[in-house]
Image (cartoon, rainbow, N blue to C red):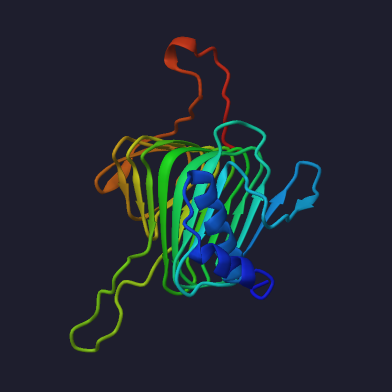
Amino acid sequence: MKKKYRFLYHLIEILPFKGKRLQKFYHLVRFYYKGNSFVIVRKDGTILTNPLRIFPYVYLKASGKCSGNKVIIAEPIKNGFNIEFNFWNGGNNTVNIGANCMVVMIAHIQGSNGHCVMGNNNYICESTLYMYCSGKTNFIIGDNNLFSSQIVFWAGDGHSVVNPISRELTNIGGNIRIGNNNWIGMNVCFLKRAKIGNGCIVGYGSVVSKSFDEDGCVIAGNPANVIKKNIIWAEAPPWDYNGQLYREVN
């Protein structure tokens, strides 16, 4: 792959690229030249791997020494899908996004051997993912989740915290896991080792920094805690609620 795009890569390095579409093509060629891959899985199951086709809903960037990164996305069937991947020094990270998702997100992935997996029928609006992969870091979202806007997922730190005596690293990255059928409010921050079960609500501005295994609860606060139990929720607003649940706990 690297040899295949060598000439084109060096050509675009010396050309004065202007315009958003040309910049996108420039970064796409760099992404492939560094040894990374990107595929679209269509609804009928066929694989689309045209390497130089510019998809309007995906922006791929690769900087520094990064290779072996894989991005696999089920072809969106709705409007409102726009995601930017920024891969920084590191490799062998995988990203897999399921079907029927509406995602507007910027993802910064640095380090190696991280896994980002998103299930089906998820809605994420104008949010940011930071994956600083020290060790094997996983960011996993289940199915049928509804996320509001300005949400930050922080699965690791960008700098080291070290024991002053032993010089050992003390802030190794941790996983973020979000189950199925959850409703996440605006301005929520998920830190490393955060975990949410199924059918939960996370309130506005909460900072989730630990594991919540209980299903059907309201989680809120900084740091977040369970403030209500035994709930279910519906996507319809209160003035239109008619007893139907759009996303029920499995």
Q: Residue 108 lies in what quarter of the image?
A: bottom left
Residue found at the far bottom of this picture: 166
Residue at position x 60%, y 69% in the image: 33
Quadrant where the C terminus is found in the figure: top right
Q: Is residue 99 left or right of residue 246?
A: right
**Residue at left offset 61%, top offset 47%:** 119
Residue 23: image x %, image y %? 50, 52
Q: How many marks?
A: 0
Viewer-proximal residue among 180 and 34 = 34
Asked whether 19 or 233 is in front, the reply is 19
Residue 80 in sight: yes
Which image quadrant for residue 249? top right
Percent coordinates x, y for residue 178 in the rendering: 49, 49
Q: Residue furthest left?
A: 164
Q: 142 or 12, which lies in front? A: 12
Q: Residue at x 50, y 60 (%)?
A: 15
Q: Residue furthest front?
A: 15
- Compared to residue 135, the image places residue 25 above or below, namely above
* Residue 86 location (% of width, % of height): 46, 58
Could you tell me if residue 213 is visible in this image? no
Q: Residue at (63%, 42%) from the top-left corner?
A: 120
From what the image shows, is residue 148 above or below residue 234? below
On screen, residue 65 above or below 149 = below
Could you tell me residue 123's position as x and y percent? 52, 36
Indicate the quadrant containing the N terminus: top left, top right, bottom left or bottom right. bottom right
Classify 227 as above or below 49: above
